[in-house]
Image (spheres, grey):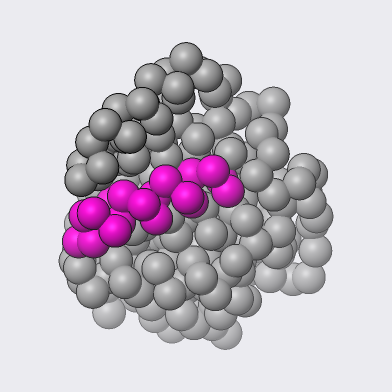
């Protein structure tokens, strides 16, 4: 769980959103170029075509410059503390300033290398800035820290599906989420993704069952 962020309860849904119903259009070749910040699953490719990478959309949180300044001051005074850097990264993330968020998440991970939430947040930022391979590498690092981290696995499926066009890999990741906790928000989101994937592309997922 991310701390000090408007999206602290839903980092996975910052990337998955509620747009799994649009997976079908992507699979059959509807190469949409636009995306909404809460649902990048609407895009066929990870590149945010509606705005430059790192630019805020109309739905982004307004960046609190005073809070940013205060946190930067705290970070300077506390060079060994990860938390002010995490808080800064979260502010930039919520404002969709992903390049800035990346810098602070990276700095935080130098001080807290086993923080799975920060690692996964960093991966999401990579995805949003059209770095799918780096996103996958970072998600795999998160799974080294905690192989059963549901938000990481849910995001892994999204990046595999929409960043790498790897539907088999996405299916496996989402099945793991369902197997871990089918009634959790992540489990429910993974179920919706799998159901839509089966409907749109039964050759990929039609014969497989969640958690199998």
Residue 177 can be seen in this image: no
Asked if residue 200 is positioned above or below residue 119 in the image, the reply reads below
Residue 144 can be seen in this image: yes
Magenta stretch secondary structure, dominant:
helix
The furthest residue to the top: 66
- The residue at 31%/45% (across/down) is 185
- The residue at 30%/56% (across/down) is 109
The reply, left or right, for residue 50 in relation to residue 126 is right
- The residue at 50%/35% (across/down) is 92
Residue 26 image position (x, y, % from top left): 71, 64
Q: Which image quarter is the N terminus in?
A: top left
* Residue 28, image quadrant: bottom right
Q: Nearer the viewer, residue 120 or 180?
A: 120
Q: Nearer the viewer, residue 17 or 143?
A: 143
Asked if residue 133 is positioned above or below residue 2 in the image, the reply reads below
- 112 in magenta: yes
Residue 106 image position (x, y, % from top left): 39, 55
- The residue at 47%/15% (across/down) is 66
Q: Which residues are magenta?
A: 98-117
Residue 177 image position (x, y, % from top left): 29, 63
């Amino acid at each position: 769980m991310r701390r000090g962020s408007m999206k602290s309860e839903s980092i996975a849904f910052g990337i998955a959103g509620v747009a799994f119903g649009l997976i079908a259009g992507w699979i059959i070749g509807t190469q949409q170029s636009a995306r909404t910040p809460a649902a990048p699953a609407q895009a066929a490719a990870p590149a945010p075509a509606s705005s430059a990478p790192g630019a805020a959309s109309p739905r982004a949180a307004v960046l609190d410059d005073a809070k940013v300044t205060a946190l930067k001051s705290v970070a300077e005074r506390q060079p060994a503390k990860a938390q002010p850097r995490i808080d800064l990264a979260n502010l930039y993330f919520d404002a969709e300033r992903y390049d800035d968020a990346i810098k602070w998440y990276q700095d935080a991970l130098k001080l807290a290398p086993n923080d799975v939430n920060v690692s996964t947040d960093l991966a999401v930022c990579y995805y949003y800035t059209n770095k799918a391979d780096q996103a996958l590498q970072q998600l795999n690092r998160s799974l080294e820290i905690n192989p059963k981290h549901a938000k990481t696995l849910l995001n892994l499926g999204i990046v595999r599906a929409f960043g790498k066009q790897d539907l088999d890999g996405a299916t496996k990741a989402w099945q793991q989420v369902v197997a871990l906790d089918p009634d959790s928000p992540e489990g429910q989101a993974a179920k919706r993704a799998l159901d839509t994937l089966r409907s749109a592309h039964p050759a990929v997922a039609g014969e497989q069952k969640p958690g199998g």
